[in-house]
Structure formats: C-alpha cells, structure tokens
Amino acid sequence: MTEALGRVGLIGGSGLYDLPGLSTTSEVRLETPFGVPSDAFFVGELGGVPVVFLARHGRGHRLLPSEINFRANVWGFRKLGCDALISASACGSMKESYRPADVVLPDQFIDRTHRRIATFFGDGCVAHVSLAHPVCPHLLEVLDRAARAEGARVHTGGTYLGMEGPQFSTKAESTLYRSWGVDVIGMTNVQEAKLSREAEICYATMALVTDYDCWHEEEQAVTVETILNVLRANATTANAVLAAAVSKINAARRCSCRDALKFAVLTRREDVPEAAQARLSLLMEKYWR
C-alpha cells in the first residue's frame, strides 16, 4: 500500500471561493508542465488537518467550466503533497426526489464534454488507467457520514452527467439525459475524477443541488438568479461538511486509487521522449526511479 502524503486537497466550486475555518500558512502560485492553475493554492490546516484549498473557477468566478485548466489544478494538488481530493460543486437535479439544497454523492460519471483535455499522458507516453469505479469508496463513505451528521438531506451513489456548458441544457437534452437514468448534471467533475485517478489521488465529490435543470414541468427553468439564491445556502452546508470530513479520512485506507498507474503505462521509459519524461516525472516518480 502506498504511504499517505499527508494532505487533503479541497476544491471549491460555484459559490465556494474561500473556506471559513481554514488556517492559512501560505498562498502558493505554481507553474506547472500543463499551464496555469485556476488560482493560488491556499495551504494550511482545517480543524488541525493539513489541507490545500483551491477555488475551481478562481476567486471572483472568472473561469468558464471549459476554461478551467483541470490538469494544472490536479497536478498542483499532487505537487503540494495531496493524496486525497474532495470537491464541492453545484449541480442540477434530474430526479423529482433530489431537491434544491440536497447533497448528492455520485459514484459514477458520464462524460458529455468535447472541448477538454482529461489526461496527463500522450506525446510519446501511453497509459490506460481503470476508471470503472471513479470515486474512492473510503472518501465517499466519509462524506456520507459527515453530511448526515450535519443534518443534510443526502443521496449517496448515482450518476453525474458532465456537460460542456456554459449554457444550461435545452429541454430536449434534459429529457434525453433523464431517460438515461442519470441523477445529477454539472459541468466540472468528470475531468477532475479522471485526472485524479491518473495522479493516483483518491477523489470524491459533493454535488449540491441548485435546481431541476429544465425538465421539470412545474418548476421555473433554471436561471442564474435562482441558482445564486440556493448557492448561498449550499455554501454553508459545503463548508460544514468539508470541515467535518477531512478529520475522518484514514491515512491507511484500503483502496486502489493510489496505485492506479502500477500497470497502466504501456510505454517503456527508455522509449518515452525526454520532454514527456520531464512532464510526467512527478506522477511517475515511484515507477521511474
């Protein structure tokens, strides 16, 4: 079993641009082989647990979902010593029983994006990680317990559909996705899950429902105004759950997330171009020693 790196990464989504209770020791701006992250990383402690926090869209919400440099963000968490990553994000409900302000903890994803790079590999080095179970079961259980302890209405398990955006769905799209049996819809979590697996970081997400997308006949079609109203309440819930969850993560957890690259890389190191070796050195350090 891989040794824990000792820090928990936290990603704040829409409406969550800082983390009350975070005792910050440094604000770190990184240059990565994959470009610029969304913002500075805030390194510190939350309830005595070493954490790193990043605002996914940047402070002030400056980045569209399609503009987020997911590779730089995840690489940054790995560089700063994180081996667990929990994200919070807004989402639309695709089920009657999943109401605004509910917490959904998906364990599956469907990727309907088409403008995003979701791998660190390529350009001379090929890897195929397993993504059959994209969410770390231990982190999922931790989030479930923390959310219920905070009194949230929680739905654990289910499928998150990742759409490109930035526009919300057409009614035809929303109806189609509902017919697939998905539970929630959002614009950011799929790439984080894929890249975290390649970076051998345990990943789970807390999706906070803001609306019913546009499929619901009795509800008003989703607007930014209605979402903002729910986001304020959701941010309070997210802050409380994240603070409670980080203290419950077991450093000796038994999962395969932190060894995902062990048999995934097909290219021999000697055949990987020097530029690719340099770019992947952080991720491959325990295999290319």
Image (cartoon, rainbow, N blue to C red):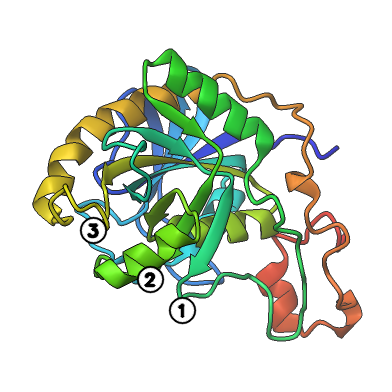
Whole-percent x, y for residue 256 in the image: 79, 44
In the depicted structure, whether residue 273 falls above or below residue 146: below
Please name the residue shown 47% across and 75% down the image: 116
Q: Which mark is residue 214?
A: 3
Whole-percent x, y for residue 208 in the image: 35, 39
The amino acid pointed to by label 2 is Glu
Specify which label sits upstream in the sequence, 3 or 2.
2
Q: Is residue 68 visible?
A: no
**Which quadrant would the C terminus be assigned to in this image?**
bottom right
Packing grade of label 2 (10 A; few <14, some 14-19, many >=20) is: some
Q: Which mark is residue 164?
A: 2
Q: Looking at the image, do the residues carrying marks 1 and 2 touch, with CB atoms under 8 Å apart?
A: yes
Specify the quadrant of the image occupied by residue 37: bottom left
Please name the residue shown 77% across and 85% down the image: 273
Could you give the CA–CA distance between mark 3 and mark 2, rounded to whole angstroms? 16 Å
Q: Which mark is residue 114?
A: 1
